[in-house]
Image (cartoon, coloured by chain):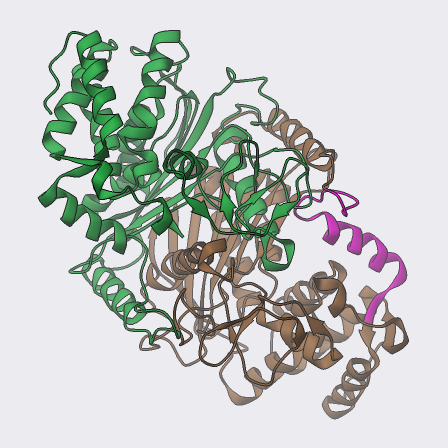
Chain colours: A green, B brown
Amino acid sequence: MLESFVLKEDDAVRVGHEDLRATTTAIFEKMGVPSDDAAVAADVLVMADLRGVDSHGVSNMLKSYITGYTNGTINANPDWKILRERPSTANIDADLALGIIIAPKAMDIAIAKAKQTGIGVVTMGKAGHVGMAAYHAMLALPHNMVGICLSGTPPQVLPTFGAEPRLGTNPIAVAVPTNTEDPFVLDIATSVVAVNKFRIAKRLGATIPGGMLADMEGTPIMEAGLVPDDFLSLPTGALRELGSHKGYGLACVVEILSTVLGGFGFAARNTRQSPGGFAHYVAAYDIDAFTDVPEFKETMDDFLQTLKATRPAPGHERVLVPGQLEAEATAERTAEGIPLHKEVVEWFRGTCAELSIACDF
Amino acid sequence: MLESFVLKEDDAVRVGHEDLRATTTAIFEKMGVPSDDAAVAADVLVMADLRGVDSHGVSNMLKSYITGYTNGTINANPDWKILRERPSTANIDADLALGIIIAPKAMDIAIAKAKQTGIGVVTMGKAGHVGMAAYHAMLALPHNMVGICLSGTPPQVLPTFGAEPRLGTNPIAVAVPTNTEDPFVLDIATSVVAVNKFRIAKRLGATIPGGMLADMEGTPIMEAGLVPDDFLSLPTGALRELGSHKGYGLACVVEILSTVLGGFGFAARNTRQSPGGFAHYVAAYDIDAFTDVPEFKETMDDFLQTLKATRPAPGHERVLVPGQLEAEATAERTAEGIPLHKEVVEWFRGTCAELSIACDF
């Protein structure tokens, strides 16, 4: 599926991840973001690019973040605060902090709570976009914890049988430590495909398979074709027969555990957040609270190796595990540089010139 | 989809839920199960039937539970114990307790912990089948808590691109309290359809749509037809293009948070549980730890009403919310009785005669 979205090598410029990180950090600093926060924000974006999750990297997201800082829908120096707290839980008013900056802080709180009680869960609202949700889930890994990140996003996905968007793409990310295997990292939208990926497909003029979008009446488009100008997004499963009520239901769960649980209303009626506001959820499970950590990690290795060793169905080369392609991309892109479309590189150079900062590439 | 599985009225006998509960309780007692536990076990089964979840009611499950007690793979008087505990977490060795009996006990522990710390999570392994997972999640509702139940089940589902079953149907159930609306109750297998539903379809000779099963080589069968004698189950999404890697990934998450986290190995290699053993996970979130309960419930009402008021796509009458059909079935079946296939009624009468107990219908 995603193969058709891949950037053509002719249009690509390879940029080293350290150069991209330094330049991106400088742009955030120029937006008024404190240096520590700017470094985290750049790290979230560049890690998405390193992992091959281009939909959530600099190309698609940085411009909208700059717009947010410029028009005041994102706050560079938020006075975020904990609204309510218990030994294992906290709920945060993010004061329009960008999600990619507040979510790691929330995960730090969740990890500290998990060390004390076995699990920590932190919700946050009045926040900006969370970026690649896996980033925040993966912060739990060095602590021998399972990390989870959910994000309630503005409505653009149809409920099953519906003709009006009511739910966000509401992603679910889960990261689990291993011993010798790459960590298990699942990061999925509860819609068929993250809308950002359609933006890339449209920019590249790529053909997409049937069953990924609905027309403006809500009827699924089952033929392959170009991304239309106007479309509606379907929940995972696409059709009721194939389980779209499951994608729809899970999107509701993500919204409930982030937006509703934090007291931030719900996305389809934005009464308790600014328009376009996001709410997020992070959780950390201390593995040692349940079982021995070394044994757990060995079992995870066995589990993932067993899945990878599954005999493939006809027409397929191998069975993948969640996070495997991203780990492979990270290895390749760390060595060879991150492929950016030449127009994106031009945009960086122009933006840096406007902001009077150096562009490292 | 499920319409084709519905029992024909000609073949059905309506049985009152109280009679069905009393007789089922007596059968469990005859298996040596203590009275309190027998009553809970019967309640789980009958609530599934009341909610229209026939796949997890008496017709499909009771016989296998009796077989389990008879051959010793389920323990009527388990010496279950907490292996490890923290303020918000516990991990239980169920000593072959039936899941439908141990999961409510685990949920009681999770609820008590959530009252203290904001959240409680309890894992349990070396257990039997969990029944309708929603039952256990719904136990949190009267406590103004969100309830979750996950169950790691024996392997019968293919990984994406795979030709060998590696994962269970690994259900996810989430129950959320409301004010005037029926509670939000999602209960979904991470496979396209719970395998029990295919058993019913096969028994009824019903046609199933394409995209629900794979052939024995692992290739999805995309044409409608009867349930074949031999088949393999697909993860939710069915095809990679429609997101089967999401169903596959979520099935892994369920297995990790139940079986692996509890130290019970993993289902595809049963080294730490008896063959056919299950592991489960329950969680309770105290809403008051995050936000005001009355406001939360009102927001949930608004959220569900907004979803239900979504304009339907062409060809559809209404947009449903998770738990709505089940609440409607409960109202109808409480009043009119639970429709059991006449062969099921015969089985009950024969079983009661064999066990020398009264059958109330």
Say if residue A224 shows up in the picture: yes
Say if residue B361 shows up in the picture: no
Quadrant containing the C terminus of chain B is bottom right
In this picture, is A346 found above or below A191?
above
x and y percent of residue A144 in the render?
22, 49
Check the image and name the residue furthest to the bottom: B354
Residue for point 52% across, 17% down: A275
In this picture, is A200 found above or below B240?
above
Quadrant for residue B208, please give it: bottom right
Residue for point 33% across, 62% down: B260
Residue for point 49% across, 51% down: A209
Near-viewer residue (B178 or B1): B1
x and y percent of residue A159 in the render?
63, 41
In this picture, is A131 found above or below B74?
above
Report whether B31 appears left or right of B280.
right
In this picture, is B12 found above or below B177?
below
Quadrant for residue A48, please give it: top left
Report whether A139 appears left or right of A236.
left
Near-viewer residue (B51 or B138): B51
Quadrant for residue A240, please give it: bottom right
Quadrant containing the N terminus of chain B is bottom right
Near-viewer residue (A314 or B148): A314
Residue for point 55% across, 53% down: A237
Check the image and name the residue furthest to the front: A10
Residue A302 within the segment the image draws in magenta: no
Residue B333 within the segment the image draws in magenta: yes
The number of discs equals 0
x and y percent of residue B66 in the render?
62, 83
Magenta segment, which residues? Answer: B314-339
Report whether A10 appears left or right of B278.
left
